[in-house]
Amino acid sequence: MSYKFLDLPQLVDRRSQLASKGNLSKRKTALKDLVRVWHHSLTLKHLSGSTAIGFANYHVNTLGWERVGYTFVIEPQNIIDTPKGKRARIVYANNVLDRSYHVGNSNDFSLGICVAGDYRYDQLDDATLASMVDLHRALKVDKIGKEDKSHHEMPGYAWKQCAVFDYAKALNFKPNQPVDKSLPEVYVVQQGDTLWGLAKNDSRFTVEDLMKWNNISDPSKLQVGQKLSFKESKVDTKPTAKTENSQNNTTSIVDYLNSIGVDSSLTNRKKIAKQHGINNYTGTAAQNIQLLNKLRSTTVPKAAAPKKEYVVLPASAQTWRTYKLGVAPVAKNSDWSLTPAAFGGLTYEILDRPQPNVVTINTSRGKRNIYVGPDTSAKFS
Ligand SMILES: [Zn+2]
């Protein structure tokens, strides 16, 4: 018979290693009818003897018992990292079927659990509370015990200062779960968010991914309250899988690249084609289909795109002049202004660098040049 409590990652079976001078009798009471009795050790939890070993030595060598008095000992001074968080070590000290000494005449129908510490002075810490909860839950699953009591609630022991903690309250403790860092299904854009800011320092996605997955062509149009997906949507993945090696699709390579926010100019398509082993790409219909199928069968489409550069217009900038392509970037030629402050900063892919300190970006009004000289607050990534 294997018990559930044996699977607790913070539990160690020390039944064969603790001090002993013989064997305990077997219980007559069935496991399901036992009372789980909570004790504390009345020894401060940080003291070196406040462990199962210490209690076993005392009970066997000083008191002359066959074995330690408790079935389980929880040791706050031994903290174990488990997948569920930090836990105090639980020592399995006596077989649950054996009758150990902890509540006098009630021993046969009682199972002793000792939380090391003197809780007249010590505090129950979270790792210890979590181990109490874990052990209690496992014992219930194993159908070991029908109820819980404190030592002082057992017949004849009302005077005993054991256990002074409130076990019922302790067993209601909700252990802190480790913080869940998995990506949410949907992220709602908050004030000041930018795609660049969301993707920064997160290796799981890039600005291009977010643009592609959410069909965003202009990151500057991010709206507070807008919903973003952190993964490829079904709409996107389906054609990817289906059209692998298929000639039978109608989307053009230009539409495809635009949809994932990649520059679809012939110059850039030539670069991408070369990266995918299509040499001498000139943009013929056959080559376009070939390139499209290659891109769609690439599991990580972003690898297909050339390394991109971005210009970041920080939130400290109220406005930023734009210029139509082909005009000198001087104030009188400006046709419009971006408002980085209103968006908590704006980030654009650099499509071109037509002259020193001027970059071409794609705005909601189409391609524009902006001046990003060292005398401005523009940053690059
Ligand atoms: Zn006690």
Image (cartoon, grey):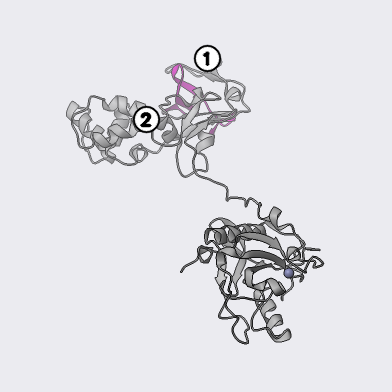
Residue type at the position of mark 1: Trp
Q: Nearer the viewer, residue 192 or 134?
A: 134
Q: Secondary structure at mark 1?
A: strand
Counting residues from the start of the chain, the first of labels 2 and 1 encountered is 2
Q: Which residue position is annotated with label 1?
A: 336
Q: Is residue 378 magenta?
A: yes
Taking 120 as reference, is 353 left or right? left
Taking 103 as reference, is 277 left or right? left
- Residue 111 location, quadrant: bottom right
Q: Give the spatial CA distance, label 2 vs label 1.
A: 26 Å
Q: Residue pushed farthest front?
A: 28
Q: Position of residue 176 (x, y in %)?
A: 62, 50
Quarter for ligand 1?
bottom right
Q: Residues within 10 Å of mark 1 (few under 14, many from 20)?
A: some
Q: Which residue position is annotated with label 2?
A: 260
Q: Is residue 355 magenta?
A: yes
Q: Which residues are magenta?
A: 352-381
Does 325 sit above or below residue 108?
above
